[in-house]
Amino acid sequence: GQQVQQSPASLVLQEGENAELQCNFSTSLNSMQWFYQRPGGSLVSLFYNPSGTKHSGRLTSTTVIKERRSSLHISSSQTTDSGTYLCALERDSNYQLIWGSGTKLIIKP
Amino acid sequence: GALVYQYPRRTICKSGTSMRMECQAVGFQATSVAWYRQSPQKTFELIALSTVNSAIKYEQNFTQEKFPISHPNLSFSSMTVLNAYLEDRGLYLCGALGSQNTLYFGAGTRLSVL
């Protein structure tokens, strides 16, 4: 089965609402990364988070290894947050990234 | 801080021609660089892993003859897509390995083939 399951597949919110994105994994973890993919395709690296909680502005990433999950929280969403969010797990330092299927986020004004 | 610049951001080439993309590590030494491709079906694949002063390891379905890689120093790597065809379209991503085995990613190079 899929080693990284990302949910939800799509999410539509009103501007100002909070967004919660999840990645669950079934394999060992060396690192978890979160990316934002712009509508044009280019990637922005958001977090490198092997464990614990990290903050960056309105974004928070939490990885709990014991529970095999990582989450990305966006507070007070803005229309410019719209796009696809991807999580990627690196297993065993072999540089093979196992990618989630992505969450398409749409923030309505 | 550690940054990876990847360029060009977008490129279009004619079918059968070649294009080169570059990856520059700033603020850290990239002992290894991993190149990935995201196909139009949104699947990311590892193309190859390049380590300075070591042989480049290509994954199955990718070859040096098709995707030659240069990694001359600890801050720069380039990859060429030779004889590009429609199936080579996609987003190419470089990830440079920094300290504590952290991979830092460029923004990607989007390749379109006419």
Image: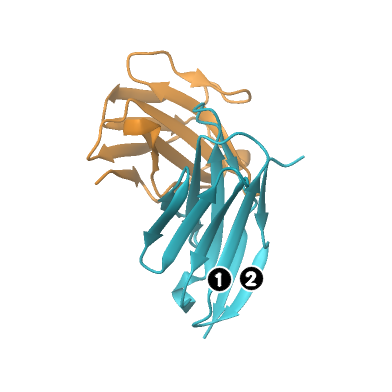
Type of residue at label 1?
Answer: Ala
Which residue is at 35% across, 45% downward?
B7
Colour convention of the picture: by chain
Instruction: Give the chain ID for the cyan colour.
Output: A
Seen in the picture, residue B71 relative to B5 is either above or below; the reply is above
Kindly state the secondary structure of the residue where label 1 is placed: strand
- Horizontal side of A50 relative to B60 (left or right) equals left
Mark 2 crowdedness (10 Å alpha carbons): few <14, some 14-19, many ≥20 = some
User: Residue A103, percent across and down?
Assistant: 61, 61
Name the residue beneath numbered marker 2.
Answer: A11
Type of residue at label 2?
Answer: Leu
Between A62 and A72, the residue placed more toward the observer is A62
Mark 1 crowdedness (10 Å alpha carbons): few <14, some 14-19, many ≥20 = some
Name the residue beneath numbered marker 1.
Answer: A19
Foreground mark, 2 or 1, reads: 1
Q: Are marks 2 and 1 in contact (CB under 8 Å)?
A: yes
Which residue is at 77% across, 39% downward?
A1
User: Residue B28, percent across and down?
Assistant: 25, 36
Between B110 and A96, the residue placed more toward the observer is A96
Q: Residue furthest right?
A: A1
User: Residue B83, percent across and down?
Assistant: 52, 31
Seen in the picture, residue A28 relative to A10 is either above or below; the reply is above
Q: Which mark is residue B76?
A: none
Between B38 and A107, the residue placed more toward the observer is A107
Q: Colour of chain B?
A: orange
Which residue is at 64% across, 70% downward?
A11
